Image (cartoon, rainbow, N blue to C red):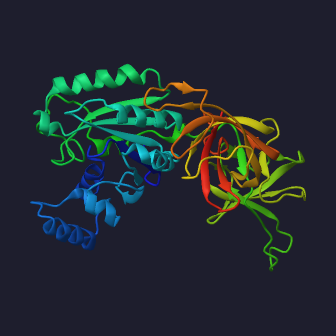
Amino acid sequence: MIDTNQLLRFTTAGSVDDGKSTLIGRLLYDSKAIFEDQLQAVENTSRRKGHDGVDLALFTDGLRDEREQGITIDVAYRYFTTPKRKFIIADTPGHIQYTRNMVTGASTANAALILIDARNGVIEQTKRHAFIASLLQIPHVIVCVNKMDLVDYSETVYEEIIAQFEEFASKLIVKDIRFLPISALKGDNVVNRSEQMGWYQGAPLLHTLEHLHISSDLNKIDARFPVQTVIRPQRDGFIDYRGYAGRIASGIFRPGDGIAVLPSGFTSTIKTIDTLEGEVTEAFAPMSVCITLEDDLDISRGDMIVKTNNRPEPTQEFDAMICWLHSQPARPRTKYTIFHTTNEQKAMVKDILYKIDINSYDRDEADKTLTMNDIARITVRTTRPLMIDEYRDNRITGSFVLIDDATHETVAAGMIL
């Protein structure tokens, strides 16, 4: 049974012209998720460009540069709903110089759609995007073999591409990989089953997305509640109310649970858990709640409420895989501001252990420079302890960003090892 209110975030990836934007346009178009004015605007643009029908890619290629070049150069987000589920799509670029955009779009995704042109098979870009999906611990990967209409809907071609992908994917850490033969342009196996590929017995893409089981992807064991703000209403009926508001990162909290507040280590018991709809007897990720405690403790933004018998390890030094996002290279021993959950403090890149060639997966231990789109393993040192988990166990408490103090720009996104 699928929760109709459950939100699925998925990202698309593939080489340039593999048809990512067309696929999303087809999903939106065939599932009737496009407003009439949007459809009219795209129809007008398609006519001006001399297309016979509607250019589906224009539904996502929102930037003028993209429409002129016919490519995606930024992360385009689209939202749509079916009777079964709500969706957020991140349409990410295919060029190597936009690796950082894929990392951004995929960082919160439940699933990754990797498109392969049936005429070209598995290429370097395919391997690169699969590696990034693995690095970001995206739980579900759906490999869409697109443009099947251009290879006469050949089952042999499809099976050869699956074999190619599985050969290198054995080195990756992905829990769930599925394969689909589609034609985004013609609509085969996107929303409706294909009449041209009777040999394929699986469900079409939309059905697969609607029924993808994502509840178990959340960490329900390690209870982590980063405090965003303290709520003191100071009005009739709430004179003594002191609540700690935020979004649950993982785990389950209930009134009566024994908790510890980190980094202070003070302990107490949960008194109530309040939401916008009222008081609840159980709260879990990713709910936004306000927790009150039996004791008055000194708690502020950046602290973390956890179960007394399950605490993260406070640490000031840790290794992480990062993607360098900024055009300016990393400066050794420079102080940055690190944002980890709701905690903000100073940090520096203590050491660059190795960089990864995302084409070959080889490690380069000699190169100690970090430039835009580089992926590397580094050692980070912070001024005060952070309450961290490994990224593979918890994508919220295991991730961070680095901010340049001078420009206030985000320079890196990291995954704690």
Frontmost residue, 85 versus 102: 102
Percent position (x, y) of residue 405?
A: 71, 59
Frontmost residue, 176 versus 402: 402
The quarter holding residue 43 reads bottom left
**Residue 301 in view in this figure:** yes
The answer to whether residue 230 is left or right of residue 41 is right
* Residue 128, placed above or below residue 52: above
Percent position (x, y) of residue 188?
A: 18, 43
User: Which residue corresponds to the image point at 41% horizontal and 37% vertical from the top-left?
Assistant: 129
**Residue 286 in view in this figure:** no
Quadrant where the N terminus is found in the figure: top left
* Residue 408, placed above or below residue 158: below
User: Which residue corresponds to the image point at 47% horizontal and 37% vertical from the top-left?
Assistant: 132
Percent position (x, y) of residue 26?
A: 24, 53
User: Which residue corresponds to the image point at 49% horizontal and 38% vertical from the top-left?
Assistant: 138
Quadrant where the C terminus is found in the figure: top right
The answer to whether residue 18 is left or right of residue 77 is left
Count of numbered circles in the view: 0
Percent position (x, y) of residue 358?
A: 47, 32
* Residue 44, placed above or below residue 302: below
Frontmost residue, 406 versus 128: 406
User: Which residue corresponds to the image point at 69% horizontal and 61% vertical from the top-left?
Assistant: 406
Frontmost residue, 206 versus 55: 55
